Image (cartoon, rainbow, N blue to C red):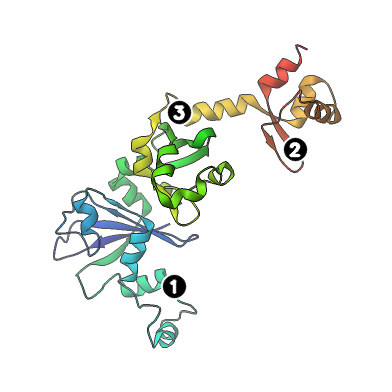
Amino acid sequence: MKAFAIKDDTVSKSRELAYLLYYEMPRMFFIEISEQTTEWEAPLLLSSFVKDGKYTVDAYWSRKWVQQRIVPPDRQNLGEILRKNGLKEYDEFSLLELSGGKCAQDECYIEPVSEDEVYEKMQDRFGKKVKNAVPLENYDILLFFENDMVKKCSLTETLSEKKDFLPLRNNPDVFDRVKVLPGGQGICWGETLTISNEELYQMGEQIPLTPDDFNIYIEHEVISTAEAAERLNCTRQNIEDLIRRNKLHPVKTMLKSKLFLNSEVERRKWK
């Protein structure tokens, strides 16, 4: 990740109005506006977010802000501009760095900063970013946040209210493909179907467990085919036979191995 402070010396020379975060692999931008920034101080395009009490700008509008400050892709002499600046292709981030984030509509510019500085300034906000998301049955989702909070969210209502989420309704296989957005900014299904971390944090029901509790559970409870065979004093072929006869149930099947719950394997010893 690369981070930049968004500044405007006509507003303040000593504080940042916002931070621009760029995630290189997915080529995604996000803007985190300082809570000290007022609606009148906010950079172009961002004032409406502050007015609505929103200080995290989603990927779509963050990219729009960037696009206002670089050469547009339909510029007639674009090829000449790219060659002059040593660029082989149109790249929004490289062009933003070259422009310094400046544009004719305001006095804003960008200045490189460290990730640590951003996290330090916005520690509470980043604590509510999503660390991991696990899809459950009935369109529920288990969420782990950076502040070690664990919450369970029911997305049934969200999926039914938002027309864009129609592909997920009555399609658990697609729902199960949920991913965490870069920087934990929320969850997504592809590029367009997203739910912000703020919305998830607010709607989720807290579970009195920590991520470490889940890690310990996995460490003690999940075992491999080889371990299951050793516990039952049998061969891998015997394990496969138990599976075929519906006497043993793998929790995950991989190409060359399977994973089982230790508790179920132990119960087989009773029979």
Label 2 secondary element: loop
The residue singled out by tag 2 in the image is: 257
Label 3 secondary element: loop
- Please provide percent x and percent y for residue 124: 30, 40
Asked if residue 16 lies left or right of residue 207, the reply is: left
Can the viewer see residue 56 in this picture?
yes
Q: Residues within 10 Å of mark 1 (few under 14, many from 20)?
A: few
Q: Residue 147: which quarter of the image? A: top left
Q: Residue 208: which quarter of the image? A: top left
Look at label 3 and name its amino acid: Thr
Which of 253/153 is in front? Answer: 153
Query: Looking at the picture, does residue 5 appear above or below residue 198?
Result: below
Look at label 1 and name its amino acid: Asp
Residue reaching furthest to the top? 270
Q: Residue 91: which quarter of the image? A: bottom left
Query: Looking at the picture, does residue 181 appear above or below residue 65?
Result: above
- Please provide percent x and percent y for residue 67: 34, 70
The residue singled out by tag 1 in the image is: 91
Asked if residue 58 lies left or right of residue 246, the reply is: left
- Please provide percent x and percent y for residue 38: 16, 54
- Please provide percent x and percent y for residue 267: 71, 15
Q: Residue at x 50, y 54 (%)?
A: 190
**Label 1 – label 3 distance at C-alpha:** 41 Å
Look at label 2 and name its amino acid: Ser
Question: Residue 210's mark?
Answer: 3
Q: Residues within 10 Å of mark 3 (few under 14, many from 20)?
A: some
